[in-house]
Image: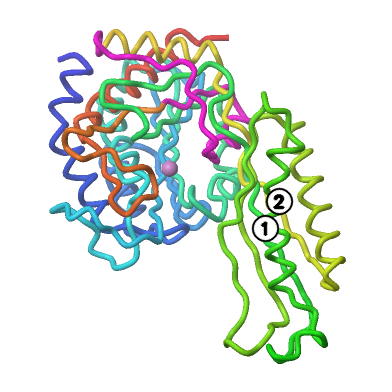
Amino acid sequence: MTLLERAFALRDETIARRRDFHQHPELAFNEVRTAQIVADELRNLGLEVTTGIAETGVIGLLHGAAKTPVLGLRFDMDALPIQEETGASYASLVPGKMHACGHDCHTAVGLSVAKLLAEKKDELQGTIKFIFQPAEEMDGGAARMIAEGALENPSLDYILGLHVWNELQLGWYGLTPGPTMAASEIFNVKLSGKGGHGAQPHVTRDPILAAAHIITALQSIVSRNINPLDTAVVSVCQVEAGTANNIIPQEALLTGTLRAFKPEVMTTVIERFKTIITEIAGTMGCQAEIELIKVTEPVINDPVLAELMTEVVLELQPDAKIKTDLQTMGGEDFSLMMQKAPGCFMMVGSANPARDLDYGHHHPKFDVDEACLPYAVAVMAQSALRVLEQRPK
Ligand code: NI
């Protein structure tokens, strides 16, 4: 049986697993049930398993006929705090939590890839490190796994990852040599003023008014400070202030995200961001505390690995279409792992408008066409074999 035939033989198992994970979504660092299933399955397959890395992360080592090179295959496991509205028979059983980004698919695909490659253990020209990561969506799961040594002993020579992608239709793949996903920073801003009676504004320092001016002025960064031929995003996504209709509050809180592909663009965004907030807050008699947290670096695919994966896709699925210029302002903390070894992150087209399966990621009706899953399994497994054989430089 070819790898593709084997991936299709595992199709029902892959889909059943995905639906099980989908029904039992778990948020960042709480992927306890998911991690248990992953660890049990990897042990059943004979892998050397380590659990509890970054709370719920799982590593599985598959030793082949040769010790090196070492290839990392990374799959993320976490869900989102969203109330599902798909109406699917396998919809989330947990109120307020949902796999609205497809990480349920990634975990299921990862387990099937592990099964296929474990069957080919004796032919493997190296070691495969399966990395099942918690908390991709928030709180920095990749950074914590790296800090806890997940990419050491053995260290990686290459790393591959994937994402189901509803901005591409079924049969399409995104394999962009070079930058494909943006760097991202999250921000928390606290504006402190002087509270008081809503009818006595002149004796207060209103942080809500300061927040309103700041939110508007921040939009001038992209429109007036960034070269129109470059790209950046400044989004205020949460505003919190006040407790009653006649109280001017002491504080207002803003949180949100900054995105860019180029480091120099991100530097400009951050400089302007700080200046605008500090100076407007000052003008309004308020004080600003700004916290910025780097979440991801840009995802920059190694061109040789992107080419190798493209060849594999076209061998396994000759009518597939490859998008080689896919760029999204979405961020991925896979980028932090790619700083340790050359890597490639593949987008697997999963949208099918004819079946109403084309809602965007993080939407309450997000779902994918599962027909992409056996191909994703075959492409990852075949690419792994190919990387270990060819050892691209
Ligand atoms: Ni995602």
Considering only vertical position in the picture, is 144 above or below 232?
below
Which residue is found at the position 80% from the left and 46% from the top? Answer: 272
Considering only vertical position in the picture, is 65 above or below 132?
above
Which residue is found at the position 78% from the left and 58% from the top? Answer: 277
Dividing the picture into quadrants, the one containing residue 180 is top right
In x, y percent, where is residue 185? 65, 47
Which residue is found at the position 28% from the left and 58% from the top? Answer: 84
* CB within 8 Å, label 2 to label 1: yes
Q: Which residues are magenta?
A: 317-346
Instruction: Determine which residue is flagged by label 2.
Output: 218
Q: Which mark is residue 215?
A: 1
Which residue is found at the position 37% from the left and 32% from the top? Answer: 167
In x, y percent, where is residue 150? 55, 42
Left or right: 224 as drawn, with respect to 142: right
Q: Look at the numbered disc 2 and give the secondary structure of its residue.
A: helix
Q: Amino acid at mark 2?
A: Leu
Left or right: 106 as drawn, with respect to 67: left
Considering only vertical position in the picture, is 373 above or below 90?
above
Left or right: 245 as drawn, with respect to 121: right
